Amino acid sequence: MPLVIESEIERMTPGESPERLSRLVYHDPSSLARITRVALQHLRGPRSENVEVVQTRARHEMVRLERGLIILEIIVGIAPLLGLIGAVSGLVHVFSHLGLSSGGGGSDTRQIALGIAEALNATVFGLSIAVPTLVGFTYFSRKVEVMSVEMETLVVELINKCYYGRATRDQRTPQFPTSVA
């Protein structure tokens, strides 16, 4: 969210030419600049068409902003499952050793303890990956959502200012055919 573009949109007065803003967004690589460029490029057309084109570009920008979040989301889902697999594997070892051992109670206890340790270590490992990843995923998802709302507000404000004072097709004086009676 480049501050210079944001402040220029807010500074503009309704009906003012967006020439200065157009120069600012021309080379800027930000999502806001790309959406603003699309809005400015379609000012000659009707407002409704401009809004549709801007919405399409905004959806495209949202996909770009969210592209890395899918990896975090997958890690959040898979890490606890890997921990669960390790836990189940440890418990399988515990129970398999219980059935195989006979006599020597000391070795049984040691094998049971090792299996339970394996299960708990795997669970801790999975959760230690999932929890920080979930924090990161939530943080960045929220950040993208806030940016989206801010960009939408700014672009709606821009379109309102650019179309200020223009008569829409419905507001023009209707042309009725003259009828001969």
Image (cartoon, grey):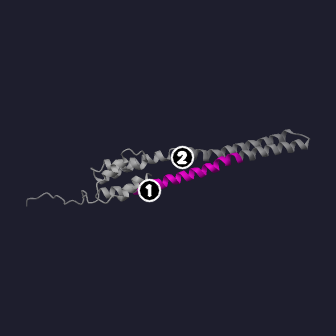
Q: Nearer the viewer, residue 65 or 104?
A: 65
Identify the mark at residue 4; answer none if there is no mark. none
Number of marks: 2
Taking 16 as reference, is 37 above or below it? above
Query: Which residue in the protein does label 1 denote?
Result: 150
Q: Position of residue 113 (x, y in %)?
A: 82, 45
Seen as rendered, the residue at the extreme left is 181
Query: Which residue in the protein does label 2 denote?
Result: 69
Q: Is residue 156 visible?
A: no
Residue shown at the point (19%, 59%) measured from the top left? 174
Seen as rendered, the residue at the extreme right is 103
Seen as rendered, the residue at the extreme top is 100
Q: Nearer the viewer, residue 5 or 174?
A: 5
Report the magenta stretch's main SS. helix
Residues under labels 2 and 1: Cα distance? 19 Å
Residue shown at the point (42%, 44%) measured from the top left? 29
Quarter-wise, where is residue 119 in the image?
top right
Q: Is residue 115 visible?
A: yes
Residue 148 is left or right of residue 38, and the answer is right
Q: Amino acid at mark 2?
A: Leu
* Region in magenta: 124-153
Q: Amino acid at mark 1?
A: Glu
Quarter-wise, where is residue 166 in the image?
bottom left
Closer to the chain start, of discs 2 and 1, is 2
* Secondary structure category for the residue under label 1: helix
Which quadrant is the C terminus positioned in? Answer: bottom left
* Secondary structure category for the residue under label 2: helix
Residue shown at the point (46%, 45%) measured from the top left? 64
